[in-house]
Amino acid sequence: MSIYIKTDDHFTSSDPWENLAAAIIIKAVEDWRHAINCQNIVWGEHLMVQDRLSALEELRAFFHSDWCGVLCPVSPAEMLLRLEREYAKSALSKIGAARSLWNAQHNV
């Protein structure tokens, strides 16, 4: 039987294997959020468009994999659905921001 302890925003288990599995899933979710939130065309620390799309495809494949199903205590399909919704909201907010900027620049 595992004992869960809350640390920061995560729960840790007394089972080190469960902690490892949780860390892998958390890292995949963090990588997803980084890929959807970074600037499209900026050199340096931010991902380029193609890199970003490749990262999202790799992460989608991971969430569809049997390996993710073994690691994840919840449905990986449900988790991916929620992440895809975040991606859609992020894209819509970027479109809205770009439209507002264009309108401001063109006095619309």
Image (spheres, rainbow, N blue to C red):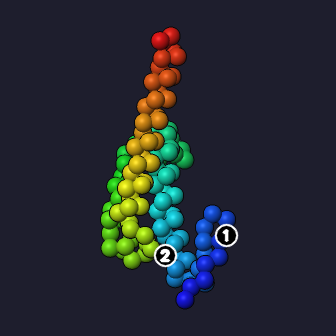
Q: Tell me the element at label 1.
A: strand
Residue 55: in sight, yes or no?
A: no
Measured from the top left, where is residue 23 in percent x and y?
53, 70
Placement of 97 over or under 90, stated as above or below: above
Front in this rendered view, residue 4 or 63: 4
- Which residue carries the number 1 mark? 7
In the displayed orientation, state which residue is furthest to the top. Answer: 107
Binning the other alpha carbons within 10 Å of mark 2 as few (below 14), some (14 to 19) or many (20 upward) gives some
The residue shown at (50%, 45%) is 37
Measured from the top left, where is residue 36 in percent x and y?
45, 47
Mark 2 or mark 1: which is in front?
Answer: 1
Residue 93: in sight, yes or no?
A: yes
Placement of 99 over or under 17, stated as above or below: above
- Which residue carries the number 2 mark? 21
Q: In the visual, does 22 lie left or right of 63? A: right
* Amino acid type for the residue under numbered disc 1: Thr
Q: Tell me the element at label 2.
A: helix
* Amino acid type for the residue under numbered disc 2: Ala
Binning the other alpha carbons within 10 Å of mark 1 as few (below 14), some (14 to 19) or many (20 upward) gives few
Q: Are marks 2 and 1 in contact (CB under 8 Å)?
A: no
The residue shown at (37%, 73%) is 69
- Of mark 2 and mark 1, the one earlier in the sequence is 1
Front in this rendered view, residue 99 or 11: 11
Placement of 12 over or under 40, stated as above or below: below
